[in-house]
Image (spheres, rainbow, N blue to C red):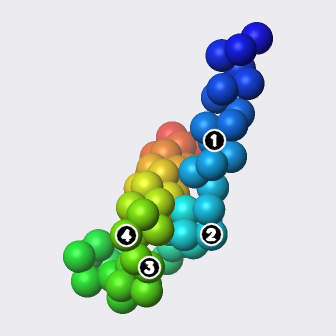
Amino acid sequence: MIQSKTAVVSEASTETEAYKSGWHDGRFGPGEVFAENQRLAGWTDFDRLAYYRGHREGRRIRTMLKESMKGA
């Protein structure tokens, strides 16, 4: 019971505006080199890290869906 509540709180805290923006860019944005991503420059410190984490997760979903479409 305590573990499930902790997981929910942890997930909610990572879903900042920067994380959501990164997720959206990773999932739907162009396949550009991440080091040249101009949207990343708009965030500072911890927001930049949240953006990166969101971008990585969005990209993972994009890749997973792309692979599942190949098998269909």
Residue under label 4: 45
Disc 4 from disc 1: Cα separation? 19 Å
Report helix, strand or loop for mark 3.
loop
Q: Amino acid at mark 1?
A: Glu
Question: In this view of the protein, can residue 27 be seen by the observer?
Answer: no
Residue drawn where x is 49% and y is 46% of the image: 64
User: In the shown orientation, is residue 70 left or right of residue 20?
Assistant: left
User: x and y percent of residue 68 in the render?
Assistant: 53, 43
Residue under label 3: 43
Picture layout, residue 34 above or below residue 57:
below
Disc 2 from disc 1: Cα separation? 13 Å
Return the disc, 2 or 1, that comes first in the chain's sequence: 1
Return the disc, 3 or 2, that comes first in the chain's sequence: 2
Q: Amino acid at mark 4?
A: Asp
Return the disc, 2 or 4, that comes first in the chain's sequence: 2
User: x and y percent of residue 54 in the render?
Assistant: 50, 58
Q: Amino acid at mark 2?
A: Glu
Residue drawn where x is 43% and y is 86% of the image: 42
Picture layout, residue 26 above or below residue 67:
below
Q: Amino acid at mark 3?
A: Trp
Disc 3 from disc 2: Cα separation? 10 Å
Disc 2 from disc 4: Cα separation? 14 Å
Q: Which quadrant does the N terminus fall into? A: top right
Return the disc, 1 or 3, that comes first in the chain's sequence: 1
User: x and y percent of residue 48 in the render?
Assistant: 40, 69
